[in-house]
Image (tube, helix red, strand yellow):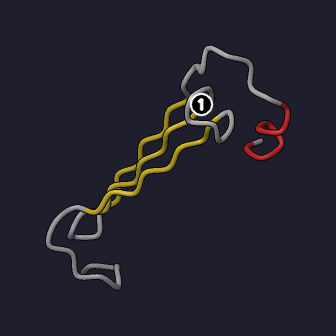
């Protein structure tokens, strides 16, 4: 039984990133999370921290924890 209110015909993937800021030219990704929902309702989750190779601003630390 599919616990989703959607009837999926193929996988649905949600992608979330956490970054050091909002400037596309200077800020970097620090975390990536992916949730893959299969048509039968199975969920596969992936999460990884990424070394941004720059200091993380205090404002970003407050937002992301």
Above/below status of 19 relative to 5: above
Where residue 58 sits: x, y (%)?
85, 32
Above/below status of 58 relative to 63: above
Above/below status of 41 relative to 33: below
Q: What residue is pinned by disc 1? A: 30
Quarter of the image where the C terminus is located? top right
Above/below status of 35 relative to 10: above
Where residue 47 sits: x, y (%)?
48, 39
Examine the image and state in which quarter residue 21 appears.
top right
Q: Residue at x 60, y 21 (%)?
A: 52
Query: In the structure shown, which secondary structural element does the residue marked by tag 1 occupy?
Result: strand
Q: Which residue is drawn at 59% across and 31% down?
A: 30
60 left or right of 2 in image: right
Where residue 23 sits: x, y (%)?
63, 37
Q: Which residue is drawn at 21% across and 75% down?
A: 8
Quarter of the image where the N terminus is located? bottom left
13 left or right of 23 in image: left
Q: Which residue is drawn at 74% across and 18% down?
A: 55
What is the crowding at mark 1: few (fewer than 14 residues within 10 Å), some, or many (at least 20)? Answer: some
């Amino acid at each position: 039984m599919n616990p989703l209110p959607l009837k999926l015909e193929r996988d649905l993937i949600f992608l979330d990133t956490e970054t050091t800021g909002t400037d596309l030219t200077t800020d970097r990704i620090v975390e990536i999370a992916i949730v893959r929902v299969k048509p039968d309702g199975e969920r596969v989750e992936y999460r990884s921290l990424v070394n941004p190779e720059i200091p993380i601003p205090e404002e970003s630390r407050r937002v992301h924890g």
